[in-house]
Image (spheres, grey):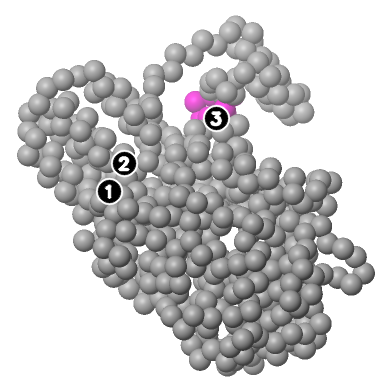
Amino acid sequence: MILLFNTMSRSKEEFIPLVPGKVGMYTCGPTVYNFAHIGNLRAYVFADTLKRVLLDDGFEVKHVMNITDVGHLTDDADAGDDKMEAGAARERKSVWEIARFYEQAFKEDLELLNILSPTLFCRATEHIQEQIELIKRLEEKGFTYTIEDGVYLDTSKIEDYGKLARLDIDKLLAGARVAMAEGKKSPTDFALWKFSPKTKKRAMEWDSPWGPGFPGWHIECSAMGMKHLGETFDIHTGGIDHIPVHHTNEIAQSEAATGKVFVRYWLHNDFLVLEAAKMSKSSGEFLTLRKLIEMGYQPVDYRYFLLNSLYRRPATFTFEALDGARSAVSNLRDRVLSLREAKGSKNPQKAEEYLSQFRSAVRDDLNTPQGLAVLWNSLKDDELGPDEKNYLLGQFDAVLGLGMDRFEKKEEFIPEEVFALVEARQTARKNREFAEADSIRVRIQGLGFLVEDTAQGPQVRKA
C-alpha cells in the first residue's frame, strides 16, 4: 500500500489509481527564461522520487511535464511583462532562442540529478489550439467575460473556487487592492487569453476568436494535462507556491469546462530555505546546480541532501549541510566499491526484511530519510554477506536514484603547477589580496581543476 499526502484533503490517503496498474501523473515544469535555481530543482527530485516509488510498486507511469515558454507574467495578478520577453530583453536574444536555450539547460540539470525523463515534455507554444478550444468551452458555458486586455474566467460562478488552498474569498475581496485591470470584476478572476498591445506586435502572439494575443499561464496546464492524460487523472505535483494561485486556477477552469474532478491526488513539496543567500531570480543572485558543480560538489551530493529531508517539510540549505551530504555520499561510494567485487551469501531472509523496511518507509508518503537510515543499517549489518548487500543496494537505488551503479574510484593526478598556484592563492588570501586570489582561482580552473576552501585548508579536485 502506498500512502500519499493529498493537499486537497490535507491528509494521507491510500493511493488507488483510476485504472488498475496504471498512473497518469502531471508535473508543473519550468518557465524557461533563466536557469533553474536549486530551490526549483527540489520539486523535480521530489516528483522523480514519487515516480520511482510507483514504478517500484509495479505501476506503469505516464508522466507529463509542461515547458512554459509563453504566457507566464512577472506578476501572478495578470500584470507585468511576459517572463519570456523579459528574458529576451535581458540577454538581447529572441524569445525563441531564450526558450530553447533554457529548456535545454533545464533538461541537462535533470540528467545531472539522475532524474528519470518524463514520458512527455509539452511546450505551451505547441498546444495553442488546445488552449483556445478549452477557453471556447468555458465561454460556451458562460464562465468567461472579455475586457480591454483579455478574456477572463469569472470565478464568482464557481461555487467551490479556492477549495485546494482553502481560500477565504470574502476576506480576499475585502482586502483587495483598489488597483485592478479596468473591467476586471474580482481580484480572483484570472486571464485565460491576453490581448497583444495595440501599439506593437509581440514576439509571441497568435490569432484567436477574440483577437491576436497569447494564452494565460494557467490555461496551458489544464489543456495539456487533459489532452495527454484525460479530463480526470491521478496525480498532479508541484511546489507549495503553486497552491493559492496556479493550481487553484487550474482546478477552477478545468472542472468548470468538464464538470468532472480534474485531479484525484495533489502533491506539493515545501520550500528550500537558504541561509545567507538569495533565491530570487530577479535579483540575479541565486544558486544553480552549475554553481554548486563549479564549487566542487557533485549533483548526487545535492540529491542526497534533498532525500535526507521529508519533501513536504521546509529544507534549510547551508553549505555545512551540503558538506555533510557530500561526506555521506563519499562514504557510500567507498562501501559500494568495496562490495562490488566481493562475493558470498549469509542471510538472504534478513535482506528481504531490510527491503520490506525500506519499502514501508518510502511508501509511507515518500519517507526517504527513513529509507536512507535502512540503507545504512543494512550496510553495517555483519549478518549480511556481500551478495545480500549488493542486492539491497540495487533495490534501494531504484527508488533513491543516487546512481550507485555508476560510482567509480577517482584517481586524480594533480600537476605541480596547480599545487604552486594553490599556494600562491593562499598567500594572496592571507595578504587580503582578494582580487589576486580570485584571478588565481580562475587560472586553476583554466587548467581543469577546482579549489575548495575548507576548515582543513584548500582542497583540489579535477573539474
**Viewer-side residue, 445 vs 200:** 200
| Mark sitting on residue 56 | 1
Mark 2 or mark 3, which has the lower sequence index?
3
**Viewer-side residue, 213 vs 8:** 213
* Residue 417: % across, % down: 64, 8
Is 179 positioned to the left or the right of 142 in the image? right
Task: Find disc 2 in the rendering and name its residue.
Answer: 398
Q: Kindly identify the residue that appears in the image at 31 percent across and 59 percent down.
A: 22
| Mark sitting on residue 104 | none
Q: Kindly identify the residue that appears in the image at 75 percent across and 45 percent down.
A: 97
Q: Secondary structure at mark 2?
A: helix
Q: Secondary structure at mark 3?
A: loop
Between marks 3 and 1, how big is the CA–CA gap?
32 Å
Give neighbour class at mark 2: few <14, some 14-19, many 20+ (Cα, 10 Å).
some
Above-or-below relation of 225 to 189:
above
| Mark sitting on residue 296 | 3
The type of residue carrying mark 2 is: Ala
Identify the main secondary structure in magenta: strand
**Viewer-side residue, 20 vs 430:** 20
Residue range (magenta):
451-457
The answer to whether residue 174 is seen in the rendering is yes
Above-or-below relation of 23 to 244:
above
The type of residue carrying mark 3 is: Gly
Is 374 positioned to the left or the right of 289 in the image? left
* Residue 39: % across, % down: 55, 52
Q: Kindly identify the residue that appears in the image at 32 percent across and 68 percent down.
A: 18
Between marks 2 and 1, how big is the CA–CA gap?
7 Å
Q: Nearer the viewer, mark 3 or mark 1?
A: 1
* Residue 67: % across, % down: 60, 55
Which quadrant would residue 382 be assigned to in this image? top left
Mark 2 or mark 1, which has the lower sequence index?
1
